[in-house]
Image: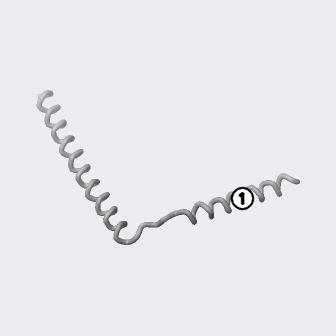
């Protein structure tokens, strides 16, 4: 077999495997997707606020020590 034919067969096999893997995916329903999205947003906001608060405290502490 020529190299071109081998490459085409490899790509064909790869796409067949990809299609088989995609058929195994179980997509979440609307309700669970909404719950998970809200949970991610809430945790992101809480983490952002925590990091901002720590940044403010550390900046205040460093300014206090420098002055």
The answer to whether 42 is drawn above or below residue 50 in the figure is below
Q: Which residue is mark 1?
A: 13
Q: Quadrant of the N terminus?
A: bottom right
Q: Is residue 57 left or right of residue 23?
A: left
Q: Residue at x 33, y 63 (%)?
A: 37
Q: Secondary structure at mark 1?
A: helix
Q: Position of residue 42 (x, y in %)?
A: 26, 58
Q: Residue lying furthest right in this view?
A: 1
Image colouring: one colour
Q: Residue lying furthest bottom in this view?
A: 30
Viewer-side residue, 34 vs 44? 34
The answer to whether 57 is drawn above or below residue 41 in the figure is above
Q: How many marks?
A: 1
Q: Position of residue 24 (x, y in %)?
A: 55, 63
Viewer-side residue, 16 vs 4? 16
Q: Quadrant for residue 12, please give it.
A: bottom right
Q: Is residue 26 left or right of residue 41?
A: right
The answer to whether 34 is drawn above or below residue 51 in the figure is below
Q: Position of residue 11 (x, y in %)?
A: 72, 58
The answer to whether 9 is drawn above or below residue 62 in the figure is below
Viewer-side residue, 9 vs 24? 24
Q: Residue at x 72, y 58 (%)?
A: 13
Label 1 crowd bin: few (<14), some (14–19), many (20+), radius 10 Å:
few
Viewer-side residue, 20 vs 44? 20
Q: Residue at x 21, y 41 (%)?
A: 55
Q: Quadrant for residue 39, please give it.
A: bottom left
Q: Quadrant for residue 67, please give it.
A: top left
Q: Position of residue 4 (x, y in %)?
A: 82, 56
């Amino acid at each position: 077999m020529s190299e071109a034919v081998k490459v085409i067969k490899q790509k064909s096999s790869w796409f067949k495997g990809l299609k088989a893997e995609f058929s195994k995916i179980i997509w979440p329903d609307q309700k669970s997707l909404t719950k998970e999205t809200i949970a991610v947003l809430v945790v992101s906001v809480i983490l952002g606020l925590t990091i901002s608060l720590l940044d403010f405290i550390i900046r205040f502490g460093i300014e206090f020590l420098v002055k």
